[in-house]
Amino acid sequence: MALIKRGVTFLMIIMSAIHVSNASVHKVGDSSGWTIIGNIDYKNWAATKNFNIGDTINFKYNAQFHNVMRVTHAMYKSCNGSSPIATFTSGNDFIKITNYGHHFFLCGVPGHCQAGQKVDINVLNVSATSAVAPNKSPSALASPVPVANAPAAPSPNNASPLFVANGAFGFIGLAMTVFCIFYF
Ligand SMILES: [Cu+2]
């Protein structure tokens, strides 16, 4: 009985954790996806998004013709996919952002990166940026700006319900497995 109770509690904790999560899924290229057709400007696409830690980048493409490689800045600039940090080939890859800064991706199929199939996901550290941005002058006479009253940045609440459902099922599946192992 105690085990069942514990299992149920475990499930409830997981489910509440899913509910509070405010992570977004960003589909690269939006409806066009990850492609060289249509000359999509991925730089422009990325510029219109607000990336945060915990968000997921979704690359949707035909796996017969494309792939996704995470690369360094130098490799990104020169379209060099010879030694990627990571390679994704499923055709529907979900990559979670876990740290600030630039995340460079390109398609490793010859010619595709040169044709523009590359994207730079820049995750800004908002708190650090706003702390530095208002006044770079070292002048001691500058009147301090009250930061406390600054309006909070609007939260981009366009989390895909599909992804949340997938995540939930994944978690529940895992929880069920753990629960069953303990119970039976
Ligand atoms: Cu490609």
Image (cartoon, grey):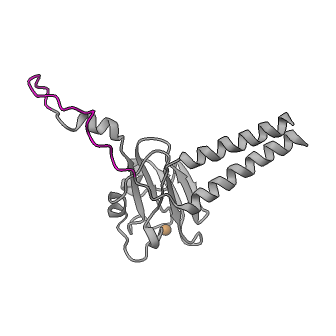
The residue positioned farthest toward the bottom in the image shown: 38
| Horizontal side, residue 20 vs residue 125: left or right | right
Q: Position of residue 73 (x, y in %)?
A: 39, 48
Q: Quadrant of the C terminus?
A: top right
In the rendered image, the quadrant that contains the N terminus is top right
- Residue at the image position 79 percent from the left and 38 percent from the top: 5
Q: Is residue 116 magenta?
A: no
Q: Is residue 139 left or right of residue 69?
A: left
Q: Which region shows up in magenta?
A: 137-155
* Quadrant assignment, res 164: bottom right
Q: Residue furthest left?
A: 141
Q: Could you say which is closer to the camera, residue 135 or residue 78?
A: 135
Task: Provide residue 163's location: percent of width, then percent of height.
Answer: 58, 59
Number of numbered discs: 0
Magenta segment, prevailing SS (helix, strand or loop): loop
Q: Position of residue 83 (x, y in %)?
A: 52, 50
Q: Identify the residue at horizontal 48%, vertical 54% (top origin).
A: 24
Magenta-colored stretch includes residue 146 = yes
Residue at x 36%, y 44% (from the top left corner):
124
Residue furthest to the top in view is 140
Farthest residue in the right direction? Answer: 184
125 or 18, nearer to the observer: 18
Judge by depth and name the residue closer to the eye, 159 or 2: 2
- Vertical placement of 126 versus 89: above or below? above
The percent position of residue 123, horizontal first and vertical second, equals 39, 47
Residue at figure coordinates x 43%, y 72% from the top left: 36
Query: Is residue 31 left or right of 174 when viewed as pictured?
Result: left
**178 with respect to 128 (left or right):** right
